[in-house]
Amino acid sequence: MKQVDFLVVGAGIAGLSSAARLARHGTTQVVEAEAAPGVHSSGRSAAFAHFDMDAWLVRALTAASMPLLAEPGATPHPALFIALEGQEAALDRLEANYREWEPRVERLAPAEARAFTPVLREGDGGISGALLDRHARKLDAHAMLEAHRKELLARGGELANGVPVERLARAGERWTADTPGASYSARVVVNAAGAWADPVAALGGIAPLGITPLRRTVITFDTEHAVRDWPFTKTVGPGFYLEPEGNGRLLASPMDEGPSAPCDAQPEEEDVALAAWNVEQATTLTIRQLASKWAGLRNFAPDRLPVAGFDRQAPGFFWLAGQGGFGLQTSPAMALAVEAAATGGPWPEELRAVGVTRAMLAVERLRTPPA
Ligand SMILES: Cc1cc2nc3c(=O)[nH]c(=O)nc-3n(C[C@H](O)[C@H](O)[C@H](O)COP(=O)(O)OP(=O)(O)OC[C@H]3O[C@@H](n4cnc5c(N)ncnc54)[C@H](O)[C@@H]3O)c2cc1C
């Protein structure tokens, strides 16, 4: 049986970014069920970083992460948030929330917004206003995963792919994890299994936190427009987002949230059709043929906030889950939080500076107090 200090279950962005930091403090092993890292949520994301996030905590974690999202993981790219007719109040709310973290954001009239995304329609269901963030970031999920993998290995940690954890048991002061080919004995187990966070906890007889996977659909299509410099363009309420994928290709999502079991998520035809419909309603684009389509699972705790902390019901069992639609852009700050919380170290200055405390991410808030 291999003895380690930290056993991290799951090689998505949460598991790998945290493992790279934990490896500074002890022997660290990551085990991933799939044949490679990032097969699930982390490899299927739109990979953008901005402050249009409902929860203050998520915006604060994003603020702490922005300076740490460095090359090769991120490049500056503008984001344009548009109000369709009837969404003006949501645009006002977004502007107020945004200014706390990015005061350089600019309010634009529809004609000014069209200078950035020229296909936006005005009037009759089209745009009525916009907010421009010139300092948002385009992320590269695979570059981020690879950078963390390399750092993990450089610090003496290990990653085993194609190794699903099938059994977890507490033995004395340690956890034993069984996989088809090997067993591990760990001081700390970090549950970074994304959509499978509750089922992985159940392997060790640990009560679920109610981590719920919600499917999100993405389509890509080619266009005759030169789109490379178009901003990430997103409606402030229901609608869609659009993002350039190179020069002649756009990526779009209808921002759907279909309930799903943890699985290899596939796009549903009606969500694919909705993506194309929502884009065509608000723009002059015509989507004749899709270049590709996919779906991924965004995983939410009941309060839609992330969790990073030990489970008092199960000593040595650490939850790292519920990264919803913000797991890439908050990963630098979350990895710092994991490093401090899992090793008992000082709370990081980067989190202190934005007002994020250990308690905000802790598990206790999700456990029903005993009657
Ligand atoms: C369409 C879409 C768009 C998104 N857009 C953005 C965006 O623009 N910006 C942003 O910041 N975020 C975005 N997200 C969210 C982001 O992708 C997620 O929050 C993030 O990837 C979650 O990472 P994770 O490591 O928790 O999960 P995952 O990447 O799913 O990793 C969990 C891993 O655990 C493994 N695993 C499960 N069970 C076991 C087991 N028993 N043993 C071993 N391994 C196991 C799985 O195989 C998986 O690889 C988007 C997500 C989707 C789906």
Image (tube, helix red, strand yellow):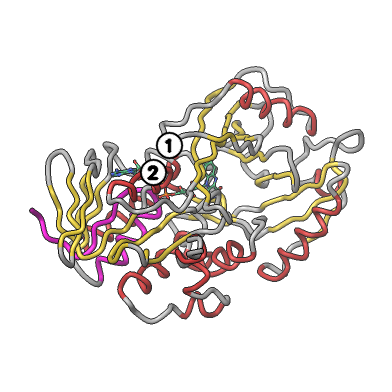
Contact (CB < 8 A) between labels 2 and 1?
A: yes
Q: Residue furthest front?
A: 371
User: Quadrant location of residue 257?
Assistant: top right
Magenta span contains residue 304: no
Q: Is residue 31 above or below residue 252?
A: below
- Residue 279 picture location, percent across and down: 72, 31
- Ligand 1 shows up in the quarter that is top left
Q: Callout 2, which amino acid?
A: Trp
Quick one: SS at disc 2?
helix
Asked whether residue 147 appears in the rendered view, the answer is no
Q: Is residue 150 left or right of residue 282?
A: left
Q: Which residue is mark 1?
A: 262
Q: Is residue 299 left or right of residue 165?
A: right
* Of the image marks 2 and 1, the number of the one nearer the N terminus: 2
User: Quadrant location of residue 43?
Assistant: top left
- Residue 139 picture location, percent across and down: 50, 51
- Residue 276 picture location, percent across and down: 68, 26
Instruction: Please name whichever residue, 107 or 85, is drawn nearer the observer in this view of the structure.
Output: 85
Magenta span contains residue 12: yes
Give the residue at x 73% y 68%: 99
Give the residue at x 41% y 47%: 194
Asked whether residue 110 appears in the rendered view, the answer is yes
Q: Residue furthest top?
A: 288
Instruction: Please name whichever residue, 98 or 238, is drawn nearer the observer in this view of the structure.
Output: 238
Crowding around mark 2 (Cα neighbors within 10 Å: few <14, some 14 to 19, many 20+) is many
Residues rendered magenta in the picture = 1-24
